[in-house]
Image (cartoon, grey):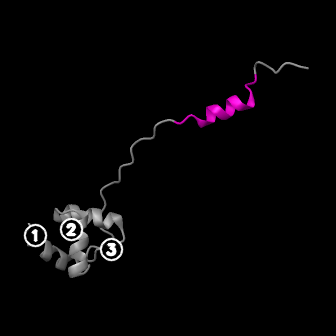
Amino acid sequence: MSHPDPARPHEHEEVEKSKVRTAHAEHVEPEKGPHDPKEINPKMSSDIHYWAKEFGVTGDQLHEAIRVHGTHVEKVRAALSHHK
């Protein structure tokens, strides 16, 4: 029986090395505007995040305002201005 070549790592050692993971950089979304400046798309998390921050409310408060007043930005803005 021949001995394995010590210069070549065993196959399982290569597999183990490939499993080692390095930490990824934190994903940060660039500040973007809304998808549509006149309508809020409640199914787009980026729209909810943007408009909630814009209006100074939580995502849940924004969703409730959209449910009651619709998705038109000015209607939601007027409804939420009474909220403050």
Distance (Cα) linking label 2 and label 3: 15 Å
Left or right relative to 41: residue 53: left
What amino acid is at disc 1? Answer: His
The residue wearing badge 3 is 41
Q: Element type at marker 2?
A: helix
**Tag 2: amino acid:** Gln
42 within the magenta span: no
Q: Residue 61 carries which label?
A: 2
Q: Residues within 10 Å of mark 2 (few under 14, many from 20)?
A: some
Q: Which residue is drawn at 14% across and 71% down?
A: 80
Q: Position of residue 36 (x, y in %)?
A: 31, 74
Q: Which of marks 2 and 3 is in front?
A: 2
Q: Which residue lies furthest to the right in this view?
A: 1
Q: Is residue 69 above or below residue 42?
A: below
Q: Is residue 18 magenta?
A: yes
Which residue is at 24% across, 66% downward?
60
Dot label at residue 83: 1
Callout 1 environment at 10 Å: few (<14), some (14 to 19), or many (20+)?
A: few
Number of numbered callouts drawn: 3
- Sequence-earlier tag: 2 or 3: 3
Residue 47, label in figure: none
Q: What stretch is highlighted in magenta?
A: 8-21
Q: Where is residue 55 in the image (x, y as percent from the top left)?
A: 17, 65
Q: Do the residues labelled 1 and 2 touch (CB within 8 Å)?
A: yes
Figure check: 11 above or below 73: above
- Is 68 in front, or is 55? 68
Q: Do the residues labelled 1 and 3 touch (CB within 8 Å)?
A: no
Q: Is residue 5 left or right of residue 36?
A: right
